[in-house]
Amino acid sequence: MKVNWKQKFKPNRNKLLIGGFGLCIAGIALLSIKFSRPTVKDKSQLKFISGQFDSYKFTDGTKGYHNYVFWLKEYSNSFQINADFLSLFYSNDFKMLNYHDSITISIAKEDINKLNKSNLFIFSILSPKSTYLDLADVIKKYNSKIDYYFFVGLLALGLSFIYFGYKSKKE
């Protein structure tokens, strides 16, 4: 049985072109986000900060929204745990921290000028008793190549939509 694909699937030129351009733009945006964040390949590119734990606010919203922030007594800004690292974070142990317990966190050296000014993403959380966010695991996940695979996939899909959009007949 021969299937007549042109009859079953009628390509809409405008939808293919718009979708293709949209996918290409999404891929380029993903790549620009990857290159605009601080470079952290090892712990030499991090600044370690010690302070007294003040408070935390962990929000798990709808549709995958997560906002995990905490404050240190010595700094006016909040410190945020990147949502990509939540699977590596021992939140139940962290919640057991007492007010004024000493902890050490790491931030990118590129972000040191933002200290006491804006929210900062962190790479590790340690106390004398425990490790709540392990630096080695975070750096490995931070430098993952999966973003490049998404970029290539979006770009390839977008370019194929554009190709078939141009090849299809105008209506």
Image: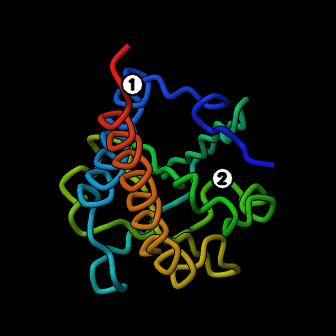
- Identified by mark 2, the residue type is Tyr
In the depicted structure, whether residue 89 falls above or below residue 5: below
Coloring basis for residues: rainbow
**Mark found first going from the N terminus, 2 or 1:** 1
Classed neighbour count for the residue bearing mark 2: other residues with Cα under 10 Å, few (<14), some (14–19), many (≥20): few
Q: Which residue is at the front of the view, 30 or 74?
A: 30
Label pair 2/1, CB-CB below 8 angstroms: no
Looking at the rendered structure, the kind of residue marked 1 is Arg
Left/right placement of residue 138 relative to residue 22 reads right
Look at mark 2 in the image and give the residue it sits on: 99
Front residue of 9 and 132: 9
Question: Looking at the picture, how far across and down is residue 120, in whole percent?
Answer: 38, 51
Instruction: Tell me where residue 138 appears, x and y as whole percent.
Output: 53, 74
Residue ID for mark 1: 13
Label 2 sits on a secondary structure element that is: loop
The percent position of residue 91, horizontal first and vertical second, equals 74, 59
Q: Single out the mark in the foreground, 2 or 1.
A: 1
Foreground of the two, 125 or 25: 25
**Distance between the Cα atoms at labels 2 and 1?**
61 Å
Q: Quadrant of residue 14?
A: top left
Q: Which mark is residue 84?
A: none
Q: Number of marks in the image?
A: 2
Asked which quadrant contains residue 162, the reply is top left
